[in-house]
Image: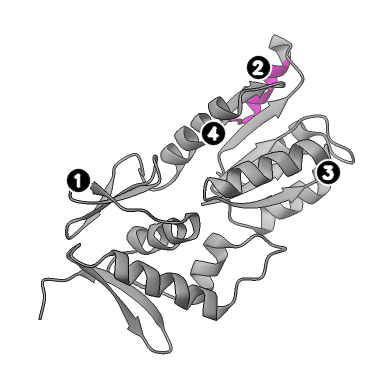
């Protein structure tokens, strides 16, 4: 899952980025409205967290342009503007949620999960393949009733494969789901995560096949 944080306060932006990355999200940051508008136009995001008091272009204008261009990215406004009129304007302009600073990080992450559930392929419903179940809202995987111990990156790779089970997923698609724009994730790292997942998914009734030159395929497997 990929999130765009639009925040001109570097301390707050850095803190949010670190917290969300620890929760397994890929995070990009924009520090002004023009940059945010460009990134939302050119990138694919599961959620945008948008401040309103931005330099160069106000957050409301960023939101207006996004919706005018047909962008459907869920937007959570995170701002110090607490007047009712500001809330109404933001929601009427197309925001999906509105939070006031200062805020509870726990509540923010809960709202993020709720918005992503609504926006991602009906992902409030757990995904299943063989005896493996993946819960996108909790970001947990289970073999029958046993929770798997997975790193944030392993969860990210598994999520991509589960969402596209039965279809080939190439390394570029996995990198796009996991990487920040300023982060380098090489082919070897993807192969390591796939190798670890294969070991942890033994006895799950699924397998990850490598199709040389094409990518990876997750499918139900009933043994040889």
The residue that appears at 30% across and 64% down in the rendered structure is: 200
Q: Is the magenta stretch mostly helix, strand or loop?
A: helix
Mark 2 Cα-neighbour bin, 10 Å: few <14, some 14–19, many ≥20: few
Mark closer to the chain start, 1 or 2: 2
Q: Mark 4 highlights which residue?
A: 109
Pointer 3 with pointer 4, Cβ within 8 A: no
Q: Mark 2 highlights which residue?
A: 88
Q: Which of 201 and 222 is in front in this view?
A: 201
Q: Does the magenta stretch include residue 87?
A: yes
Mark 2 and mark 4: Cα distance apart in space: 22 Å
Q: Mark 3 highlights which residue?
A: 32
Mark closer to the chain start, 2 or 3: 3
Residue 23 placement (x, y as % from top left): 53, 45
Residue 125, located in which quarter of the rendered image?
top left
Residue 129, located in which quarter of the rendered image?
bottom left
Query: Mark 1 or mark 2: which is in front?
Result: 1
Residue 4 placement (x, y as % from top left): 65, 47
Q: Mark 1 highlights which residue?
A: 145
Residue 221 placement (x, y as % from top left): 16, 71
Mark closer to the chain start, 2 or 4: 2
The residue that appears at 62% across and 42% down in the rendered structure is: 19
Mark 3 and mark 4: Cα distance apart in space: 23 Å
Query: Mark 2 or mark 3: which is in front?
Result: 3
Q: Is residue 20 visible?
A: yes
Q: Can residue 65 be seen in this view?
A: no
Mark 4 Cα-neighbour bin, 10 Å: few <14, some 14–19, many ≥20: some
Magenta-tinted stretch = 86-96
The residue that appears at 65% across and 37% down in the rendered structure is: 49
The residue that appears at 68% across and 65% down in the rendered structure is: 183
Mark 3 Cα-neighbour bin, 10 Å: few <14, some 14–19, many ≥20: many
Pointer 2 with pointer 4, Cβ within 8 A: no
């Amino acid at each position: 899952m990929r999130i765009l944080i639009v925040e001109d306060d570097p301390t707050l932006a850095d803190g949010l980025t670190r917290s969300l990355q620890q929760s397994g999200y890929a995070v990009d940051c924009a520090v002004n409205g023009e940059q945010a508008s460009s990134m939302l136009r050119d990138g694919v995001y599961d959620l945008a967290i948008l401040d309103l008091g931005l330099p160069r272009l106000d957050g409301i204008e960023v939101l207006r342009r996004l919706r005018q261009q047909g962008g459907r990215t869920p937007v959570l406004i995170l701002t110090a503007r607490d007047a009712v009129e500001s809330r109404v304007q933001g929601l009427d302009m197309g925001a999906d949620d509105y939070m006031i600073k200062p805020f509870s990080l726990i509540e923010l992450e809960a709202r993020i999960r709720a918005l992503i559930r609504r926006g991602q392929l009906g992902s409030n419903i757990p995904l299943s393949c063989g005896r493996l179940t993946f819960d996108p809202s909790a970001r947990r995987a289970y073999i029958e009733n046993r929770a798997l111990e997975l790193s944030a990156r392993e969860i990210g790779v598994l999520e991509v494969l589960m969402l596209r089970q039965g279809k080939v997923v190439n390394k570029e698609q996995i990198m796009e789901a996991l990487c920040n724009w300023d982060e380098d994730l090489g082919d070897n790292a993807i192969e390591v995560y796939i190798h670890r997942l294969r070991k942890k998914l033994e006895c799950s009734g699924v397998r990850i096949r490598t199709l040389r030159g094409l990518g990876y395929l997750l499918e139900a497997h009933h043994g040889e």
